[in-house]
Structures are given as structure tokens and as C-alpha cells.
Image (spheres, grey):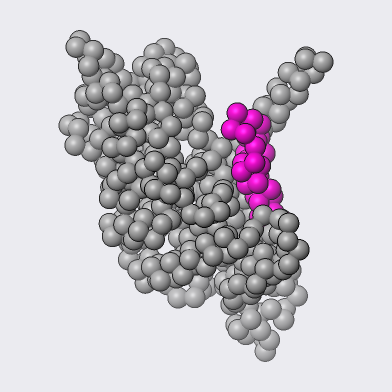
Amino acid sequence: MSTDAPAAFGELLPWGDPNWYRGYRSPYYGPSHEAWRARARAFVEENFPAADMKEWENSKRLPKELFRKTAKAGFLPCVVGEWPEEHAGPKPQGYDHFFELIFIDELARCGSGGVLWGLVEGLAIGLPPVLQFGSKALASRVGKPCLSGETVICLCISEPYAGSDVAGLRCTAEKDPSGKFYVVNGEKKWITNGMFADYFTVAVRTGGKGMGGISLLLLEKGMPGIECKQMDCMGVWASGTAYITFEDVKVPVENLLGEENGGFKCIMHNFNHERWGFIVQANRFARVCLEDSLRYALKRKTFGKTLVEHPVIRLKIAEMARQVDATHAALENLTYQLQTMPREEAGQLAPDICLLKVQATKVFELCAREAAQIFGGASYVRSGQGEKVERLYREVRAMAIPGGSEEIMLDFAVRNSVKRLQKARARL
């Protein structure tokens, strides 16, 4: 491992970027990561100007060309976990899990959860079950156009009566008399990318109550009986959040992902990666609040001084900085575990990922609040210097609830860890 310090990168505003950007030595990054970071930052700065993001937020959708640009630049395939070479071509030189961390982290600098989710979230959570559990023909037919930005996919799990309680979902799929089709009926709610999706990875009940009766099916936009309605949410407007109804939708049995009544296992298979992605996003959004606050505090004057000359403001910035950087250090450690740990052992990371998701969203909430206080009235309008802070403040709950609410994550982490401890002791 080299002990040479990496070249400084970026604006070098204190804590405005992870510390390896500022020349800190790190065991995780090398020249290939530095080159990827430079590409990602140039791409985001060129293609995500503030004026366009405001337009995309207000129109509640992204231009189709943005998906194609992101794919052509070579970034889309990195958000689905392992680089899918069969469907996306050779992975970049030196590719590992840190490439995905770097890209999502850089993309989140745009300061819009709606734009981020609209572009990559549906792909990150909707496509992996197709690639991992669909037939080879289905994975090829769906994977290639999604990874090239030509089509959009979404994951449909949450329902009006079943959010984090996945085992309680009610949307049904019954085989028709011919045995060639499933007939799907039910509702899905809060579905990211649902408004402009071409494919829907849908959790349905094919068996009895509980997790043992759940299957995953791939539905397609052209199938009669699918209706998507725009949901007006607190934040993430550009993500195409939809309320979806399925009425007698006929789905070929070949569109089953995994085994019938084995869908819960398929869903859980990607949960570590999904929640890890929320951590990356939430902590960079927190850092955006910190970065913008410090930049504003260096120039804004009150009572004859810049804001940063007031001890109370310095205290706010220090509190934000210590928590953002500590969270990022924990994130890098988890990413290293995901990179080096065999897949069959990675389940043991679930409690720590759950705890860090809570940590990241709570830090994001703190930073959004403190940034709003530093900006004052400028954070209360949807334009100008405090525009990002105003938008991100509304998007805190979008990080804290989806993928498992804070309360459920905390409870699961302890229950799962205690269960593992009891099993380990029983073997002694």
C-alpha cells in the first residue's frame, strides 16, 4: 500500500468533500479511483446546472436524454452493485465497490434527491432482482436497454397498507386456467420512477399469509390494466413517485423472478445494497448542507462581522462537520467489507448497515436544520443562495423512511445481532 498522499482535488473548502479529496492518505483509493472521481465531477457539473434542476423538479420528471447521457458516459451500470458485464460491457479498469460510492457521492452534490432518485434509484433497486433471479433471456431483454438509458425500471413493494412490513402486502397474482399467465390485482404506493417506468418489478402474493407467500414478477408498461398516478409529495419531485393500480394484468409465467413463493428471499437479497445507497446519498446531502453553510458564512455579514466570526455559527459548522466526516469514515469501512467479504457471508453486515442508515439520515436531518438556521430567511424560499438547503430540508424524510424506517432499522439491528449471538453460543 502506498503511503504517498493523493493529489488535492476540488475546492478544498473545509469538510466540503471527503478527506481523501483534501490530500489525506487512505487505504481504499488509488489512481483508478482518482480518475473516476474526476470524470464523475466533470460530468455532474456539466449536466446538472441549478436552473435545469429547478425545471426538472417543477415538471416532476427528467428529460429522457439525461438517462442516455449518463449511460453513454459510462456511469449507469455502476449503480446496480456488481458491474453487469454481460449486459453493460467490460467494467472500468480497477473497478470495485468504491467506484459506485464515488459516483453516487458526486451525483448527490447536485443537491436534489428528486433528480438523483429520478435518474438512478429505480435502476438501483428495480433491476438487480431481474439480473439475479430472472431467466437469462429476460435479464438480457430488460437489462441492456435499462443500462443504456433507453428504458426505465422501478421496484414496486410498498402498498397503502404495507410499507416496511413487506410480509403484509396484499397485491395478488393468481394463475389463469391456462397456467400460462399470472393475473395481478392490487395497488402499490410511493413507487419511485413509477410515472415514467417501462418495467415494474412487483412483489405479489401468490401463496398464503406472511413472507412465505410472496413472489416477484416483472410487469411491462404495455400490459393492459396498469395505471400510474402522480403523487404530490413533500420532496423528491423529479423522481416520478407514483400510485399504481393493477387490474387483471396478465403477466406471462416466464416473467417470474426466482421461484414462486420465494420472492421474499429475492427482495432481501438486494436490501444491503439498497440501504447502503441511502447512506451514501444522505451523507452527501448532509455534506452539501455543510458546504453551502460554510461558503455562505464566509461572506454573509451581520452586526459588522461575517457569520463565521460568530462563535455560535462556528459551533454549528463544527457539529455538522464532525458528524458528516465520522459517518463517511464508517461508510468507507462498510464499503470495504462489501468489497472483500464473500457474498454468502455479507448477511452479517445487515445490522451495521441498518445502524449506519439511521446515523446518516439523522446527521442529514441535523445538517439540514442547522444550515437553514445559518441561511435564515434565504433558506425559506425556493430560489437564490439557500435553494439547495430549502429543497434538501424537505427531502430528509425521503431518506429516513424508505428502505426501512429509522425505528425498524434500529430494532432489526439489535434483534438480528442478538439472534446471531444466541446461535453462535448454541454451537459452542
Above or below: residue 56 compared with residue 418: below
Corner quadrant of residue 154: top left
Q: Nearer the viewer, residue 222 or 228?
A: 222
Residue drawn at point x = 43 percent, y = 23 percent? 263
Relative to 354, 67 lies left or right = left
Q: Nearer the viewer, residue 175 or 10?
A: 10
Residue drawn at point x = 34 percent, y = 27 percent? 135
Extreme-bottom residue of the structure: 304
Q: Is residue 349 located in the magenta-colored stretch of the structure?
A: yes
Residue stretch rendered in magenta on the structure: 326-355
Could you say where residue 26 lies in the image, as x and y percent from the top left? 71, 59
Extreme-right residue of the structure: 428
Could you say where residue 293 lies in the image, as x and y percent from the top left? 60, 71
Task: Confirm whether residue 308 shows in the render.
Answer: yes
Above or below: residue 398 compared with residue 294: above
Residue drawn at point x = 60 percent, y = 84 percent? 299
Residue drawn at point x = 76 percent, y = 20 percent? 424
Q: Nearer the viewer, residue 105 or 37?
A: 37
Corner quadrant of residue 226: top left
Could you say where residue 39 lies in the image, as x and y percent from the top left? 48, 66
